[in-house]
Image (spheres, helix red, strand yellow):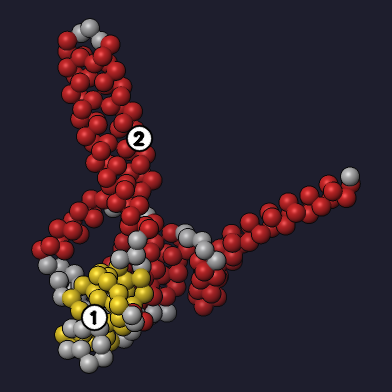
Amino acid sequence: MCGKIFLIICIALTFKASASAPYLTMDSANAAYSKSAYDKAITMYNTFINDGYESEQAYYNLGNCYYRKADYPKAILNYEKAKKLNPSDADVQFNLQLANLKTTDKITPDSEIFLANWWHKVVDICSEKGWAIICISLLCLALLFISSYLVSRNLFLRQFGFWFGVLMLAFSLFTFLFSREQYNALTTHDTAIVMSGSVTVKGAPADNGAQLFIIHEGAKVWIVKSEGTWTEVKLANGNQGWLLTSDIEAI
C-alpha cells in the first residue's frame, strides 16, 4: 500500500515538474532579456515557442531582441505574432511601426486594401476574448430590456425595453462577428513576412517566369495560394505574383 502511495506521489511530482518546465524556460528568457543578454533570451524564447506554447510577451520580447540586434525582418515577424494575440496592445503597435520604418519598401495600400485595413482596425480594438465578453454582456442586457418589455405594464417602460433590447441584440451580433473574425485571424496564416534580403516576384511559379517587381526583407505580403515550392502573394498596393515559399515566413 505504501509503495502505491509513493508511486502516485512520484508520478504527481513528475507531472508537476514537466508542467512547470515551460514557465521556467519563460522565466529564464525574461531574466536574460532584462540583463540585455539578447542571444540567450532569443534561444530561450524560441525554445518556449517551439515547444508549442504561445505568449504575447514571448513574441513581443523576442521582437525586441531581434530589433536590438538589427534583425528587422524577424523583429517584424514576432511583433506581428504578438499583435495577433493582442491587437489592442499599444506597445506592440508602436514597436511594429518602428521596425517597419527600417524596411526598404514603403508600400502605399490601394483603396480596396485600405478599406480592409480600416475594418481590421475596428476589429482590432479588442481581442477575441474581449469581444466575446462584450458580446455576452450585451446579450444579457438585451434579455434584461426584453424582459422589462414583457412584464411591465407601463407603456413607456415597454417601449424603452423593446427598442433598447433590439439595439443591444444588434450590437451583440456585431461583437459576435468581431470575435469570430479575431478567432479566424488567430487560427489562419494568410499573411507572411519576406525574410530574404531581396526577392524577385515572378509572373508564374517557375524560375523562368517573367520578372514583375522586387520586394525586400521585412515586407508584409498576403498569401493567395501555394503551388509546390512557390507561393502566390499579394502586396498592400495590389501588386501580385509568385515567389519561393522559402523566402517568406507565415505570421
Q: Name the image quarter holding residue 84.
A: bottom left
Q: Is residue 59 left or right of residue 179?
A: right
Residue under label 2: 136
Callout 1, which amino acid?
Trp
- Say if residue 88 shows up in the picture: no
Of residue 175 and residue 96, the one placed in the foreground of this image is 175
- Give coordinates of residue 200: x percent, y percent: 23, 87
Q: Which residue occupies 30% across, 77% down? A: 227
Res 62 label: none
Q: Which residue occupies 75% across, 54% down? A: 11
Q: Name the image quarter holding residue 147.
A: top left
Mark earlier in primary sequence (1, 2): 2
Q: Which residue occupies 25% across, 87% down? A: 206
- Say if residue 137 shows up in the picture: yes
Of residue 145 and residue 57, the one placed in the foreground of this image is 145
- Give coordinates of residue 29: x percent, y percent: 55, 67
Q: CA distance from mark 1 to mark 2?
A: 43 Å
Other residues around mark 1 within 10 Å, as few (<14) / some (14–19) / many (≥20): many
Q: Which residue occupies 21% across, 72% down? A: 234
Residue under label 1: 242
Which SS class for mark 2? helix
- Give coordinates of residue 111: x percent, y percent: 10, 63
Which SS class for mark 1? strand
As drawn, 180 above or below 60: above
